[in-house]
Image (cartoon, grey):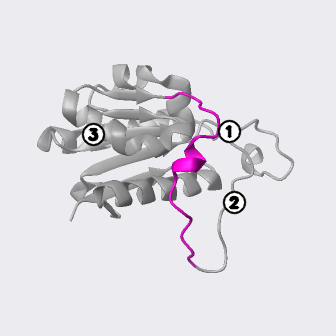
Amino acid sequence: MKKIYIKTFGCQMNEYDSDKMADVLNISDGLVKTDTPDDADVILFNTCSVREKAQEKVFHDLGRVRHLKQANPKLIIGVGGCVASQEGAAIVSRAPFVDVVFGPQTLHRLPELIAKKRETGRAQVDISFPEIEKFDHLPPARVEGASAFVSIMEGCSKYCTFCVVPYT
């Protein structure tokens, strides 16, 4: 059974996006979530650019899994989220062992980005911002318990009246 490890940084909407990443890759490739990167076939970091030092935390954690990539060259390592959108290909320049870089708007393309990486051997970067296309390609929400995340907007202006993130 193939496994996926996702580390989520930042706001609650990143938790929602991380769940969607797991769902998309479960449907396409049969990946199931694991709590440890050591036994994962795919490792994803879902990043946040609002929280303090988020960028450096991502590169620190990438350094912590680098040895896994060296031990298993078939391991896929990806960086998604807002830091990925801002930094794009610079992530691959700074951490050449990263295979896939994608923004919040392109997480539905993860299966094809991973497949293309495996096919070509080259890192794939897709930080485009298509018109709300991702919602047409995401699997239906799972029902687990009495609460759920609801996407009110995409991106972060840092000052939505309902959001506590900029002040924490």
SS at mark 2 in the image:
loop
The dot on residue 155 is 1
Which is more foreground, mark 3 or mark 2? 3
- Up the image or down, 37 lies above or below 60; here it is below
- For the question of whether residue 9 can be seen, the reply is no
* 10 Å crowding of disc 1: few (<14), some (14-19), many (20+): few
Q: Amino acid at mark 1?
A: Gly
Q: Residue furthest left?
A: 71
SS at mark 3 in the image:
helix
Between residues 120 and 36, which one lies in front from this camera angle?
120
- Looking at the rendered image, the quarter that the N terminus falls into is bottom left
Tell me, yes or no, whether the highlighted magenta stretch contains residue 112: no
Where is residue 50? Give x, y as percent. 65, 38
Determine which quarter of the picture holds residue 104: top right
Q: Residue at x 45, y 52 (%)?
A: 21
Magenta stretch secondary structure, dominant: loop
Where is residue 158? Give x, y as percent. 76, 38
Where is residue 52? Give x, y as percent. 62, 38
Q: Which residue is mark 2?
A: 150
Q: Give the CA distance from mark 1 to mark 2.
A: 14 Å
Q: Which residue is mark 3?
A: 115
- For the question of whether residue 111 can be seen, the reply is yes
Mark closest to the chain's N terminus, 3 or 1? 3
Tell me, yes or no, whether the highlighted magenta stretch contains residue 137: yes
Between residues 119 and 14, which one lies in front from this camera angle?
119
142 left or right, relative to 38: right
Residue stretch in magenta: 127-144
- Up the image or down, 21 lies above or below 94; here it is below
Q: Amino acid at mark 2?
A: Val
Q: Amino acid at mark 3?
A: Ala
Where is residue 35? Give x, y as percent. 35, 64
Mark closest to the chain's N terminus, 3 or 2? 3
